[in-house]
Image: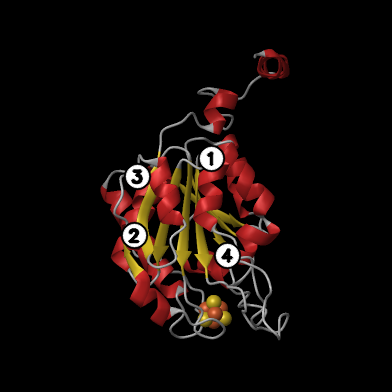
Amino acid sequence: MTDLTTYAENTWCPGCGNFGILNAFRKAVSRLEAEGIPRSRLFISAGIGCHAKIFDYLALNGLYSIHGREMATVQGVKLANPDLMAVAFGGDGDAFGEGIAHLLFAAKRNADMTLIVHDNGVYGLTTGQYTPTSPKGFKGPSTPKGSVEEPIEPLTLMLVAGATFVARGYSGRIEALADVMVRAVRHRGFSFIDVLQPCVTFNDTYKKYNALVEPVQHDPADFNAALTAARRTDRLPIGVFYEANEPVFHQELLGEHNPTQQRLARAERLERVGHIATRS
Ligand code: SF4
């Protein structure tokens, strides 16, 4: 299907920010195809939560994952077939809670993949519990008197963990989000997009985001400027905060070898593993 639609009934709440992310990604795929990257090269995965339904609504190759493991899933697929372009969708509870170890290591090793986080600051599918990005004071079923914790800062976390592409989008700015998605997929290395995504049922942040978002102003080659912008709370810049070229994980590990196209005899595999294990 040309617009990537599937047979699945859409069960997101009317007005949910997830619709903006879905529409932006459809636009991004269309633009990538126009640039010569066919959709057959894309491989997607998702975790568990409202965000993960996007997997059902995109007619693309992929594999459903479990909570917080979508990042590990696409890294494995990338190692098996480096020709694929891996994209994982995660939620904020999913990526910054259950899956945070996978997140940090994907950034640290510069895995060649894109992670798109549907960051709504709440566990929507399970009716409104607080997550790692919920603001202090957030009230929900698990924090009826208000969360006493400070939220994590996703962009700061990814910058210091070594991510080579760090961006923020807003589901209410679809064209700008599609631009960032195209750049993220094309980037060689770990691409992270934190998408501000209102949950109209349990954490409606449209008013706040509409008032505070503005385009990023700094040069994305400037790491310190990216850190400063990431820590701002008076405004919420959207766009690419940081981009750098660094060696990517699968090439450091395998060179140009593609396991799905070049099967190796056992002896040669062992020799290569020994080479990796003994090189300094
Ligand atoms: Fe969207 Fe929230 Fe409804 Fe889930 S519960 S579909 S995140 S509005």
Amino acid type at circle 2 is Ala
Residue 163 rendering spot, x and y as whole percentages: 51, 43
Q: Which residue is mark 2?
A: 178
In the rendered structure, the answer to whether residue 37 lies left or right of residue 86 reads left
Residue 21 rendering spot, x and y as whole percentages: 42, 67
**Nearest to N terminus: mark 3 or mark 1:** 1
Q: CA distance from mark 3 to mark 1?
A: 14 Å
Q: CA distance from mark 4 to mark 3?
A: 25 Å
Q: CA distance from mark 2 to mark 3?
A: 18 Å
* Mark nearer the viewer, 2 or 3: 3
State the SS at label 2. helix
Say few, some or many: other residues with alpha carbon within 10 Å of mark 4 (under 14 / 14 to 19 / 20 or more). many
Residue located 49% across and 84% down the image: 200
Amino acid type at circle 4 is Gly
Q: Which residue is mark 1?
A: 162
State the SS at label 1. loop
Compared with 49, 261 (above or below) is: above
Amino acid type at circle 1 is Gly
Q: Which residue is mark 3?
A: 220
